[in-house]
Image: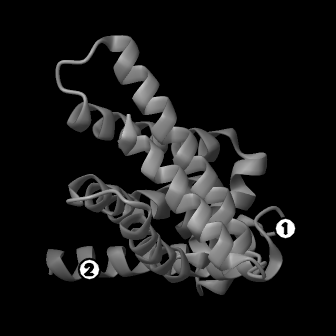
């Protein structure tokens, strides 16, 4: 019986997240209320508030769910046998696939970061965690300054990729997609030339 309640609770929570993301896509993050999310999920606001206190908490919950896949993308990058522009261009194809799969989530996160500080902090925290793991892997025995420089280099590349992919795959500005991806591959190759 307890397993049924747990499964029902998990399904209800997921329904709130899914409906929130759908509404954020249709109406925009700022124009969607908690009451609208509850109604779209076929539930009450009181029930929604048992799971989430705010829209930013819903977004952060979804960010937590996909963080492992984002981190794995960068683990693949770190584990590549070579970091030539050609190899990195292929890796960017994998990154593109992830962005297309989570287009709704990335759009919602982008909208939420503009108005909710806690969502922005969570996104920056993800970038810091990934770039710190990268620096630790590649700079064993390096000075603190060298590690910090590598982390910052990685973080700026991640932010550039995020903004470029946002405009390419969320906003649909693909007119120079191949040139942009080639340029990004060259920039990422410089990280491994150090």
According to the image, label 1 marks what residue? 31
Asked where in the image residue 104 lies, by quadrant, the reply is: bottom right
Colouring: one colour
Tell me the quarter of the image containing the C terminus: top left
Asked where in the image residue 106 lies, by quadrant, the reply is: bottom right
**Residue 45 percent across, percent down from the top left:** 64, 68
Residue at 51 percent of width and 76 percent of height: 96
Q: Nearer the viewer, mark 2 or mark 1?
A: 1
Tell me the quarter of the image containing the N terminus: bottom left
Q: Is 133 positioned to the left or the right of 88 in the image? A: left
The image shows residue 107, relative to residue 50, as above or below, that is below
Residue at 25 percent of width and 73 percent of height: 6
Q: Nearer the viewer, residue 34 or 192?
A: 192
Q: Is 88 positioned to the left or the right of 113 in the image? A: left
Q: Secondary structure at mark 2?
A: helix
The image shows residue 139, relative to residue 117, as above or below, that is above
Q: CA distance from mark 2 to mark 1?
A: 31 Å
On residue 131, the disc is none
Q: Is 75 positioned to the left or the right of 39 in the image? A: left
**Residue 178 percent across, percent down from the top left:** 63, 78
Q: Nearer the viewer, residue 8 or 168?
A: 168
According to the image, label 2 marks what residue? 7
């Amino acid at each position: 019986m307890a397993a049924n309640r747990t499964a029902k609770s998990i399904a209800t929570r997921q329904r709130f997240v899914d409906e929130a993301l759908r509404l954020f896509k249709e109406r925009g993050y700022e124009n969607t209320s908690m009451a609208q999310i509850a109604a779209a999920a076929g539930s009450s606001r009181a029930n929604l508030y048992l799971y989430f206190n705010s829209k930013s908490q819903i977004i952060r919950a979804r960010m937590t769910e996909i963080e492992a896949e984002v981190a794995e993308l960068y683990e693949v990058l770190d584990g590549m046998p070579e970091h030539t522009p050609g190899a990195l261009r292929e890796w960017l194809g994998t990154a593109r696939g992830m962005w297309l799969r989570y287009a709704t989530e990335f759009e919602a996160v982008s909208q939420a970061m503009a108005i909710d500080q806690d969502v922005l902090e969570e996104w920056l925290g993800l970038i810091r965690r990934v770039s710190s793991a990268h620096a630790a892997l590649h700079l064993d025995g390096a000075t603190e300054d060298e590690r910090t420089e590598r982390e910052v280099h990685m973080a700026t590349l991640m932010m550039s990729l995020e903004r470029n992919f946002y405009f390419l795959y969320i906003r649909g500005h693909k007119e120079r997609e191949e040139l942009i991806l080639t340029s990004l591959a060259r920039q990422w190759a410089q990280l491994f030339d150090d």
